[in-house]
Image: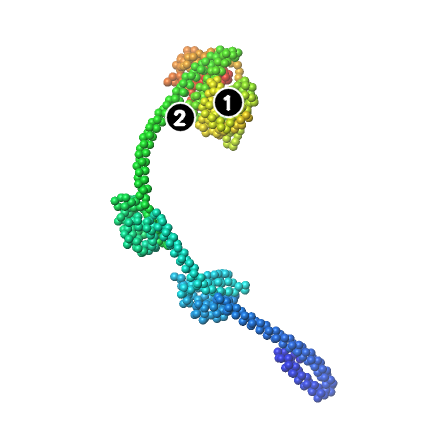
Amino acid sequence: MMDNLVDPAEPPDIQIARLKKISAVLMRRVETQTDRDGAAYSQFERAVVLEDQVRRRTEELERALRLLNESNAKLSAANSQIEGARRDLASAIEAVQEGFALFGADDLLLLFNGRFCWQMPEVRAQLRPGMRFADYVRIVSRSAKLHLPAGQTPDDWAATRMQRHRRDHVIFNLALIDDRWLQISEHRTANSGTAIVQTDVTELMRAEREQRERLLDNQGRIIRATLDHLAQGVAIFDAQGLLAGWNRRFRVLTGLPPQTFTLGTRFQRVTEQMLQLFRPAGPGDAARIADWMQGQGGQGQDGRGALSFELVQQGGGLTLDGFAQRLPDDGFVLSLTDVTAERDALRRLARANEELEARVAARTDELRDALAQAERSNASKSRFVAAASHDLLQPLSAAKLYLSAADTAGTNSNVQKAGEALTNVERIIEALLDISRLETEEEQLAQGDLALNDILSSLSSSFAPAAAAKGLRFRVRPSEAHVISDGLYLQRIVQNLISNAIRYTDRGGVFVGARRRGDKVQIEVWDSGPGIRDEDRAVIFQEFRRLHRRASASEGMGLGLAIVERACARLGLGLDLLSRPGRGSVFRVTVPLAAAGARNSRDNGDPRHLSSLAGAGLLVLLVDNDHELRRAMVALLEGWGITVLDAEGPEDAIALIDEMDFVPDAMLIDYQLNDAVDGLDLVAMLRRRFGWRPARIISADRSPVLRERCARMGLFPMPKPLDTEALYHFLSNVNPAIA
């Protein structure tokens, strides 16, 4: 209730006075009024309680008044300190030599010093606290003191300035009129406000400009000295095509009048005067120079790209090589080089070259004739070697057959030695024939699918006796691989490697095997011979060169490895050699792998199942035009218990068959019978008459053409000199019952 009698907002002394007045009024009313029901006493009690409440309230008000006085005193002191700090800050800002302004987080101007925008009085006059940053930028952009770049409007400048304002930190130079400059440094404060510092950098900019001008002057002098030092004549033109500089060499080379070389002379005038003294050397150079002068001859803003041309002095003498090139400022530079000596040298060189070409052409014709003669001689040599080999092999084959017939029991040592000698001669002749064939490019290769084991097994049985005679271990590991190659050449390659290994190995052994390496097969021949030194590796593949032993007819003439290298090259096979002197060697021949499969032929037989020919009752037709060879063959076959009907040619064979009225069990027919009919033609005639009969074509011809023709007819050629073991193998598998 007491709270309703006083206003808490009034000062405490007024509230106390009012309460005292109320208390006095209440006491008087209590004293003057009588209450018959004892109401006066109740009023007295309430007055006492009220007085107590008034006293407590008074004390509280006095305490609040005391606290208020203390707070007012502290606030007054704080205001004094703030005012002092503000005066100190203002003094500090004014003491700064640069212009300073502070914008709040809301981009409103809070304060600035007296040097802020002092170079722009109209801007300075409009600055006031609370101004927005955008208004400040707008006023500056329209200041008469602001130097705007060419082509930039005040609105463009203001937009660029506002973009910079969005960055946290930015520093840039502001150009003013009268060649004055301000550096503006704007930074974001911690409370997202903006502090701007304006520094007058006019003197610094002027000093830098003076220094740059001095540097340019120095560079100009250096360029002038450089241009005068050049052997080329140089002239520089500005973007308008006006002469801006030149060197002494340009004046000397062109010979133009002195009045031409003044600053500002147009390029067209210079070129017109030059074309009066010089003529373009190349066709179309005059038109190109004219187009370039008009700005229509190349790339670039005005159509001028690089221009190369050549000028020759009227009346001859001086030749200048010209080159014009654009500069970064759209000007261009023209350079002239004296190439008179070079052109004279080129003309002399051209004449010398023509003379040399004529001499080379004449010499080439001579060499071409010599080459043709050499090729004819080489072809004649190859034909002679082939023919001579064929003619030599005929009697050699007959001699071997006579020896085989004379010593069927194999007990006559002299006959065996004679056979070995004939075999050595046969090998030499075969080697010479192989060399001749490998040197003939017309020799065609018959590459096909070969069962590698057919070659390895044949060579195993052929070389086993020779290895055993020397006490060597000889092993050929069978292989199921099929390869793509020429069968005859591949067999000769492996045969020569094995023969060479056995010949040079005195102890230990020789091992032959094949390894698969991806899509290829490596045929390896290992030996424990003396090995080959690195410096001798190139020698061993040369003809008639042998290491460790003296070359002789009985031990070969050093043609084996030469044949191996040339055959591998012709077949495209890899040939590698690994050797350690004193430990042995290994030769590797890499052959393409073919799909696996067996090579079957009804003429083939297994040498492990040879049966005796005696008592078989075979009737064999032999046709050969070589009388001695035919007699030797008859003697050999009859020694084996075979009935032989021999004829010299196709007509004799047909007449003999008609006269005797017989069907042969097998046929041995020479390939070269006469000009009209060869052995293959005779086989075809006899097969048409009697049906299929086992047959062999006997020939010293080892050409792929013969092998291909035989293959088409299901035949196999049997080369001369005849291998009696192969002949025995063939006849032992002939079944007389088919007759």
Residue 72 pos. (x, y %): 61, 75
SS under mark 1: loop
- The residue carrying pointer 2 sits among few (fewer than 14), some (14 to 19) or many (20 or more) residues within 10 Å by Cα, namely few
- The residue carrying pointer 1 sits among few (fewer than 14), some (14 to 19) or many (20 or more) residues within 10 Å by Cα, namely few
Give residue 548's mark: 1
The residue wearing badge 2 is 442
Tags 1 and 2 touching, CB below 8 Å: no
Work out whether 174 lies above or below 588.
below
Quadrant occupied by the N terminus: bottom right
Q: CA distance from mark 1 to mark 2?
A: 36 Å
Residue 304 pos. (x, y %): 34, 51
Residue at the location (68% across, 85% down)? Answer: 24
Q: Quadrant of residue 220?
A: bottom left
Residue 347 pos. (x, y %): 30, 39
Left or right of 366, for residue 575:
right
Left or right of 653, for residue 617:
right
Front-lying residue, 28 or 579: 579
Residue 262 pos. (x, y %): 30, 55
Q: Residue furthest left?
A: 315
Work out whether 553 lies above or below 1.
above
The tag earlier along the polypeptide, 1 or 2, is 2
Residue 596 shows in this picture: no
Q: Residue furthest bottom?
A: 32
Camera-near label (1 vs 2) is: 1
Q: How many marks?
A: 2
Amino acid bearing label 2: Glu
Amino acid bearing label 1: His
SS under mark 2: loop
Front-lying residue, 461 or 557: 557
Residue at the location (32% across, 54% down)? Answer: 243
Give residue 293's mark: none
